[in-house]
Image (tube, helix red, strand yellow):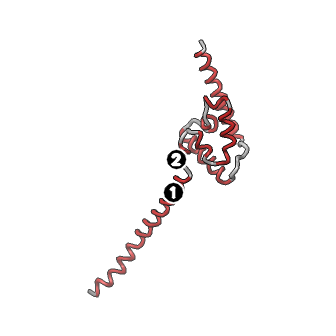
Amino acid sequence: MAEESRESPRGMRRLWLPVSFAAALGVLGGLGGYTLRYAEGLSYLSRDPEACVNCHIMQPQFDAWQKASHHAVAVCVDCHLPESFFYKYYTKAENGYRHGKRPRPSASRSRSARRVERSCKKTASAVTASSRTTSR
């Protein structure tokens, strides 16, 4: 019986590390999941323009897009993100990080401005080509 009492503290010490790790992982996972849900984080993986106004600072840009004629043919991601799967989500993460650090719309960086210009020209030429074929 004396041997059992000596074994118990040693067994408890071995159990302490995995239990602590699991508890810490559970707390971090729970907080991360709650934050993701509260911030509507999964909406940022979509093409829905409403995701752009999850952050209140983008509301004026969203309102202007809705009033513009091109809202019928292009959504935010068509002009503001690359087409490549990897670079699209990399750019979304980068933009989210920048917007998080500076909670106001910032002037477009030259890389972003070039991407928007290329995308607008591509979309405009596709819409123009489409309207020519439907008008015949």
Q: Element under label 2? A: helix
Q: Which residue is mark 1?
A: 34
Q: Position of residue 36 (x, y in %)?
A: 53, 53
Is 128 located above or below residue 7 in the figure?
A: above
**Residue 14: x %, y % from top left:** 38, 74
Secondary structure beneath label 1: helix
Residue found at the very far top of the displayed protein: 136
Between the C-alphas of marks 2 and 1, the distance is 12 Å
Task: Please tell me in which quadrant of the rendered image residue 44 appears.
Answer: top right
Residue count near mark 1 (Cα–Cα under 10 Å), binned few <14, some 14–19, many ≥20: few
Residue 1 located left or right of residue 61: left
Residue at which label 2 appears: 42
Quarter of the image containing the N terminus? Answer: bottom left
Nearer to us in this view, 82 or 47: 47
Indicate the quadrant where residue 86 lies: top right
- Name the mark on residue 83: none
Mark 2 Cα shell of 10 Å, populated few (<14), some (14-19), many (≥20): few
Q: Position of residue 121 (x, y in %)?
A: 67, 28
Across the whole image, how many numbered discs are drawn on residues?
2
Q: Is residue 21 left or right of residue 121?
A: left
Picture coordinates of residue 19 (x, y %)? 41, 69
Residue in the image at 56% along x and 37% along y: 84
Q: Is residue 134 above or below residue 31?
A: above
Report whether 24 appears left or right of 60. left
Viewer-nearest residue: 63 or 44: 63
The residue under label 1 is which amino acid type? Tyr
Q: Please name the amino acid that badge 2 sits on.
A: Leu
Which residue is found at the position 64% from the left and 38% from the top? Answer: 80
